[in-house]
Image (tube, rainbow, N blue to C red):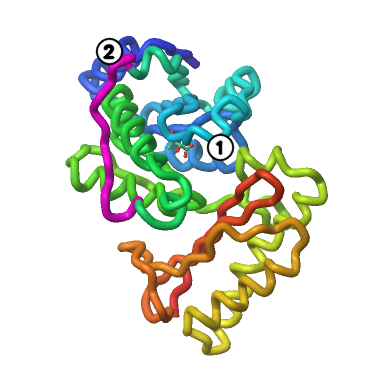
Protein backbone atom coordinates (compact mmCIF):
# COMPACT_ATOMS: atom_id res chain seq x y z
CA UNK A 1 0.00 0.00 0.00
CA UNK A 2 1.37 3.42 -0.99
CA UNK A 3 0.87 6.57 1.03
CA UNK A 4 0.96 9.71 -1.08
CA UNK A 5 1.01 13.14 0.49
CA UNK A 6 1.62 15.35 -2.51
CA UNK A 7 -1.45 16.31 -4.63
CA UNK A 8 0.78 16.61 -7.74
CA UNK A 9 2.20 13.12 -7.23
CA UNK A 10 -1.29 11.71 -6.64
CA UNK A 11 -2.56 13.22 -9.87
CA UNK A 12 0.51 12.14 -11.90
CA UNK A 13 0.13 8.56 -10.68
CA UNK A 14 -3.64 8.49 -11.22
CA UNK A 15 -3.26 9.76 -14.81
CA UNK A 16 -0.55 7.15 -15.45
CA UNK A 17 -2.75 4.38 -14.05
CA UNK A 18 -5.70 5.52 -16.18
CA UNK A 19 -3.52 5.59 -19.32
CA UNK A 20 -2.43 2.03 -18.47
CA UNK A 21 -6.09 0.98 -18.62
CA UNK A 22 -6.68 0.59 -14.87
CA UNK A 23 -10.01 1.52 -13.30
CA UNK A 24 -9.88 3.44 -10.03
CA UNK A 25 -12.36 3.19 -7.17
CA UNK A 26 -12.31 5.95 -4.58
CA UNK A 27 -13.52 6.40 -1.00
CA UNK A 28 -12.95 9.93 0.32
CA UNK A 29 -12.81 10.16 4.12
CA UNK A 30 -11.77 12.47 6.90
CA UNK A 31 -10.06 9.57 8.68
CA UNK A 32 -10.72 8.12 12.14
CA UNK A 33 -12.10 5.20 10.21
CA UNK A 34 -14.84 2.92 11.45
CA UNK A 35 -16.78 -0.01 10.07
CA UNK A 36 -18.96 2.37 8.03
CA UNK A 37 -15.93 3.61 6.06
CA UNK A 38 -14.61 0.07 5.68
CA UNK A 39 -17.94 -1.04 4.19
CA UNK A 40 -17.58 1.74 1.56
CA UNK A 41 -14.07 0.46 0.76
CA UNK A 42 -15.42 -3.08 0.32
CA UNK A 43 -18.15 -1.75 -1.99
CA UNK A 44 -15.51 -0.03 -4.16
CA UNK A 45 -12.98 -2.86 -4.01
CA UNK A 46 -14.92 -5.40 -6.05
CA UNK A 47 -15.84 -2.90 -8.76
CA UNK A 48 -12.44 -1.63 -9.92
CA UNK A 49 -8.78 -2.55 -10.42
CA UNK A 50 -7.35 -0.18 -7.81
CA UNK A 51 -8.73 1.27 -4.61
CA UNK A 52 -7.75 4.76 -3.44
CA UNK A 53 -8.83 6.25 -0.12
CA UNK A 54 -8.19 9.82 0.92
CA UNK A 55 -7.74 10.85 4.53
CA UNK A 56 -8.11 14.60 4.78
CA UNK A 57 -9.84 16.62 7.48
CA UNK A 58 -11.07 19.30 5.13
CA UNK A 59 -10.90 22.72 6.82
CA UNK A 60 -13.26 24.43 4.37
CA UNK A 61 -16.27 22.38 5.45
CA UNK A 62 -15.97 23.40 9.12
CA UNK A 63 -17.62 26.60 10.36
CA UNK A 64 -15.75 29.04 12.61
CA UNK A 65 -17.37 27.56 15.74
CA UNK A 66 -17.05 23.92 14.76
CA UNK A 67 -14.72 21.17 15.88
CA UNK A 68 -11.92 21.29 13.24
CA UNK A 69 -9.05 21.26 15.75
CA UNK A 70 -10.77 18.69 17.94
CA UNK A 71 -11.83 16.43 15.05
CA UNK A 72 -10.48 12.97 15.98
CA UNK A 73 -7.37 11.86 14.11
CA UNK A 74 -5.35 8.63 14.31
CA UNK A 75 -3.40 8.10 11.11
CA UNK A 76 -1.51 4.98 12.25
CA UNK A 77 -4.72 3.20 13.11
CA UNK A 78 -6.34 4.36 9.85
CA UNK A 79 -3.32 3.15 7.89
CA UNK A 80 -3.59 -0.34 9.42
CA UNK A 81 -7.32 -0.48 8.68
CA UNK A 82 -6.76 0.57 5.05
CA UNK A 83 -4.06 -2.07 4.70
CA UNK A 84 -6.50 -4.67 6.05
CA UNK A 85 -9.11 -3.67 3.45
CA UNK A 86 -6.69 -4.02 0.55
CA UNK A 87 -6.48 -0.29 -0.20
CA UNK A 88 -3.81 0.31 -2.85
CA UNK A 89 -3.17 4.02 -2.29
CA UNK A 90 -3.89 6.25 0.69
CA UNK A 91 -3.90 9.91 -0.31
CA UNK A 92 -3.02 11.87 2.84
CA UNK A 93 -2.35 15.51 1.96
CA UNK A 94 -1.60 18.48 4.22
CA UNK A 95 -4.18 21.30 4.18
CA UNK A 96 -1.56 23.78 2.89
CA UNK A 97 -0.86 21.57 -0.12
CA UNK A 98 -4.57 21.31 -0.95
CA UNK A 99 -5.50 24.99 -0.72
CA UNK A 100 -3.44 27.90 -1.97
CA UNK A 101 -3.43 30.74 0.57
CA UNK A 102 -5.34 32.89 -1.93
CA UNK A 103 -7.66 30.12 -3.23
CA UNK A 104 -10.77 31.84 -4.60
CA UNK A 105 -12.74 29.29 -6.63
CA UNK A 106 -15.54 27.31 -5.00
CA UNK A 107 -18.08 24.72 -6.06
CA UNK A 108 -21.39 25.89 -4.64
CA UNK A 109 -24.46 23.69 -5.09
CA UNK A 110 -27.52 25.91 -4.73
CA UNK A 111 -30.71 23.84 -4.64
CA UNK A 112 -30.14 20.99 -2.20
CA UNK A 113 -27.67 22.60 0.21
CA UNK A 114 -29.80 25.18 2.01
CA UNK A 115 -31.96 23.00 4.27
CA UNK A 116 -31.31 20.19 6.76
CA UNK A 117 -27.62 20.30 7.82
CA UNK A 118 -26.95 23.19 5.43
CA UNK A 119 -29.26 25.46 7.45
CA UNK A 120 -27.28 24.97 10.66
CA UNK A 121 -23.89 24.84 8.92
CA UNK A 122 -23.70 27.64 6.35
CA UNK A 123 -20.86 27.07 3.89
CA UNK A 124 -20.46 23.41 4.88
CA UNK A 125 -21.59 21.93 1.57
CA UNK A 126 -19.63 24.51 -0.40
CA UNK A 127 -16.54 23.17 1.39
CA UNK A 128 -17.59 19.56 0.78
CA UNK A 129 -18.31 20.08 -2.94
CA UNK A 130 -15.09 22.01 -3.46
CA UNK A 131 -12.88 19.41 -1.80
CA UNK A 132 -14.64 16.48 -3.49
CA UNK A 133 -14.26 18.17 -6.90
CA UNK A 134 -10.55 18.71 -6.17
CA UNK A 135 -10.16 15.10 -4.98
CA UNK A 136 -11.88 13.83 -8.14
CA UNK A 137 -9.40 15.85 -10.23
CA UNK A 138 -6.46 14.46 -8.26
CA UNK A 139 -7.54 10.81 -7.93
CA UNK A 140 -9.29 10.48 -11.33
CA UNK A 141 -11.73 7.83 -10.06
CA UNK A 142 -14.07 5.84 -12.27
CA UNK A 143 -16.35 5.36 -9.29
CA UNK A 144 -16.60 6.82 -5.82
CA UNK A 145 -18.58 5.48 -2.86
CA UNK A 146 -20.41 7.78 -0.42
CA UNK A 147 -22.38 6.66 2.63
CA UNK A 148 -26.15 7.00 2.94
CA UNK A 149 -25.77 8.26 6.51
CA UNK A 150 -24.82 11.64 5.09
CA UNK A 151 -27.93 11.57 2.92
CA UNK A 152 -27.87 15.25 2.01
CA UNK A 153 -24.15 15.16 1.17
CA UNK A 154 -24.68 12.12 -1.04
CA UNK A 155 -27.47 13.78 -3.02
CA UNK A 156 -25.47 17.01 -3.38
CA UNK A 157 -22.44 15.11 -4.69
CA UNK A 158 -24.66 13.24 -7.16
CA UNK A 159 -26.02 16.62 -8.32
CA UNK A 160 -22.50 18.06 -8.63
CA UNK A 161 -21.37 15.10 -10.72
CA UNK A 162 -24.42 15.47 -12.96
CA UNK A 163 -24.25 19.23 -13.35
CA UNK A 164 -20.47 19.50 -13.81
CA UNK A 165 -20.17 16.33 -15.94
CA UNK A 166 -17.61 14.55 -13.80
CA UNK A 167 -16.91 11.16 -15.41
CA UNK A 168 -17.40 9.42 -12.06
CA UNK A 169 -20.05 6.89 -11.10
CA UNK A 170 -21.37 7.58 -7.59
CA UNK A 171 -22.21 4.45 -5.60
CA UNK A 172 -24.42 4.68 -2.50
CA UNK A 173 -23.17 2.76 0.55
CA UNK A 174 -25.88 1.71 3.05
CA UNK A 175 -25.79 3.02 6.65
CA UNK A 176 -23.77 0.74 8.93
CA UNK A 177 -25.08 0.45 12.49
CA UNK A 178 -23.77 -0.81 15.80
CA UNK A 179 -25.58 -3.98 16.95
CA UNK A 180 -27.91 -1.81 19.10
CA UNK A 181 -28.87 0.38 16.12
CA UNK A 182 -26.71 3.49 16.56
CA UNK A 183 -25.41 4.62 13.16
CA UNK A 184 -21.62 4.50 13.05
CA UNK A 185 -19.96 7.91 13.09
CA UNK A 186 -16.55 9.27 14.01
CA UNK A 187 -18.42 11.65 16.32
CA UNK A 188 -19.80 8.78 18.48
CA UNK A 189 -16.49 8.78 20.31
CA UNK A 190 -17.39 12.12 21.91
CA UNK A 191 -20.42 10.62 23.67
CA UNK A 192 -20.35 9.73 27.38
CA UNK A 193 -21.68 6.23 28.05
CA UNK A 194 -25.00 7.72 29.14
CA UNK A 195 -25.23 9.89 26.01
CA UNK A 196 -24.29 6.85 23.93
CA UNK A 197 -27.29 5.03 25.44
CA UNK A 198 -29.57 8.04 24.95
CA UNK A 199 -28.48 8.38 21.32
CA UNK A 200 -30.34 5.15 20.51
CA UNK A 201 -33.44 7.36 20.33
CA UNK A 202 -32.39 8.38 16.80
CA UNK A 203 -32.95 4.94 15.38
CA UNK A 204 -36.00 4.39 17.59
CA UNK A 205 -37.51 7.62 16.26
CA UNK A 206 -36.96 6.54 12.64
CA UNK A 207 -38.50 3.14 13.37
CA UNK A 208 -41.45 4.85 15.07
CA UNK A 209 -42.07 6.97 11.94
CA UNK A 210 -41.99 3.82 9.79
CA UNK A 211 -44.43 2.06 12.16
CA UNK A 212 -46.84 5.02 12.12
CA UNK A 213 -46.68 5.11 8.32
CA UNK A 214 -47.47 1.40 8.22
CA UNK A 215 -50.48 2.06 10.44
CA UNK A 216 -51.72 4.50 7.82
CA UNK A 217 -50.41 7.82 9.19
CA UNK A 218 -48.97 9.82 6.32
CA UNK A 219 -49.53 13.38 7.61
CA UNK A 220 -46.08 14.80 8.31
CA UNK A 221 -47.32 17.02 11.18
CA UNK A 222 -48.51 13.87 13.00
CA UNK A 223 -45.37 11.90 12.16
CA UNK A 224 -43.13 14.75 13.29
CA UNK A 225 -45.04 15.09 16.57
CA UNK A 226 -44.67 11.33 17.18
CA UNK A 227 -40.91 11.52 16.67
CA UNK A 228 -40.50 14.73 18.68
CA UNK A 229 -42.44 13.27 21.62
CA UNK A 230 -40.26 10.15 21.61
CA UNK A 231 -37.03 12.18 21.54
CA UNK A 232 -38.29 14.72 24.11
CA UNK A 233 -38.54 11.91 26.68
CA UNK A 234 -34.80 11.25 26.36
CA UNK A 235 -32.59 13.18 28.81
CA UNK A 236 -30.05 15.55 27.25
CA UNK A 237 -31.42 15.05 23.71
CA UNK A 238 -31.84 18.42 22.02
CA UNK A 239 -33.52 18.32 18.61
CA UNK A 240 -31.77 20.35 15.92
CA UNK A 241 -34.15 19.27 13.16
CA UNK A 242 -36.69 16.62 12.23
CA UNK A 243 -37.20 16.89 8.48
CA UNK A 244 -39.48 15.11 6.04
CA UNK A 245 -38.33 15.95 2.52
CA UNK A 246 -38.76 14.64 -0.99
CA UNK A 247 -36.06 12.01 -1.46
CA UNK A 248 -34.77 13.56 -4.70
CA UNK A 249 -35.35 17.33 -4.42
CA UNK A 250 -34.99 17.56 -0.61
CA UNK A 251 -38.01 19.90 -0.65
CA UNK A 252 -40.16 19.66 2.52
CA UNK A 253 -43.33 17.58 2.14
CA UNK A 254 -46.62 17.76 4.10
CA UNK A 255 -47.50 14.10 3.57
CA UNK A 256 -45.59 10.93 2.82
CA UNK A 257 -46.99 10.26 -0.63
CA UNK A 258 -43.83 9.40 -2.54
CA UNK A 259 -40.33 8.34 -1.55
CA UNK A 260 -39.61 10.57 1.47
CA UNK A 261 -36.37 11.09 3.34
CA UNK A 262 -36.84 11.49 7.07
CA UNK A 263 -33.71 13.05 8.46
CA UNK A 264 -32.84 13.83 12.08
CA UNK A 265 -30.15 15.88 13.75
CA UNK A 266 -30.06 15.70 17.54
CA UNK A 267 -27.52 17.06 19.98
CA UNK A 268 -26.34 15.13 23.02
CA UNK A 269 -24.32 17.62 25.04
CA UNK A 270 -22.09 19.26 22.45
CA UNK A 271 -22.16 16.28 20.06
CA UNK A 272 -24.55 16.57 17.15
CA UNK A 273 -25.57 13.28 15.55
CA UNK A 274 -27.52 12.69 12.36
CA UNK A 275 -29.47 9.72 11.08
CA UNK A 276 -32.06 9.11 8.38
CA UNK A 277 -34.30 6.64 6.63
CA UNK A 278 -36.24 6.61 3.39
CA UNK A 279 -39.99 6.07 3.83
CA UNK A 280 -41.93 4.65 0.93
CA UNK A 281 -45.74 4.64 1.30
O1 LIG B 1 -18.12 12.60 4.48
C1 LIG B 1 -16.96 13.00 4.71
O2 LIG B 1 -16.20 12.38 5.44
C2 LIG B 1 -16.50 14.30 4.07
O3 LIG B 1 -17.53 15.23 3.99
C3 LIG B 1 -15.83 14.10 2.70
C4 LIG B 1 -16.80 13.56 1.68
C5 LIG B 1 -14.65 13.15 2.85
C6 LIG B 1 -15.31 15.44 2.19
O4 LIG B 1 -14.39 16.00 3.05
**Furthest-bottom residue in view?**
216
Magenta stretch, main secondary structure class: loop
- The answer to whether residue 69 is left or right of residue 189 is left
Residue 259: image x %, image y %? 39, 72
State the residue at coordinates (33%, 10%): 9
Determine which residue is flagged by label 2: 12
State the residue at coordinates (55%, 78%): 223
**Considering only vertical position in the picture, is 59 above or below 167?**
above
Mark 2 → mark 1, Cα distance in angstroms: 26 Å
Helix, strand or loop at mark 1: helix
Residue 257 forms part of the magenta stretch: no
- Magenta span: 100-113
User: Which quarter of the figure has residue 160?
Assistant: top left
**Considering only vertical position in the picture, is 199 above or below 99?**
below
- The answer to whether residue 13 is left or right of residue 83 is left
Helix, strand or loop at mark 2: helix
Q: Residues within 10 Å of mark 2 (few under 14, many from 20)?
A: some
Determine which residue is flagged by label 1: 38
- The answer to whether residue 244 is left or right of residue 187 is left
State the residue at coordinates (45%, 21%): 88
Pick the quarter of the image with the C terminus. bottom left
Residue nearest the viewer, comparing 174 with 235: 235
- Asked whether residue 84 appears in the rendered view, the answer is no
Q: Residues within 10 Å of mark 1 (few under 14, many from 20)?
A: some
Q: For residue 243, which numbered disc appears in the image?
A: none
State the residue at coordinates (54%, 38%): 37
**Considering only vertical position in the picture, is 217 above or below 77?**
below
Amino acid sequence: MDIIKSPEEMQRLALFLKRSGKTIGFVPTMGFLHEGHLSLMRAARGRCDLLVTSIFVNPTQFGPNEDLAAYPRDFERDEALCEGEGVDIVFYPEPASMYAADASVWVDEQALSGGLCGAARPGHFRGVCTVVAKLFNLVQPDLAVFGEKDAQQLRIIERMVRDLNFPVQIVRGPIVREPDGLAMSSRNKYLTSLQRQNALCLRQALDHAADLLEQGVSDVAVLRKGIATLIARVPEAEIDYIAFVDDASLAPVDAVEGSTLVALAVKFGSTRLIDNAVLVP
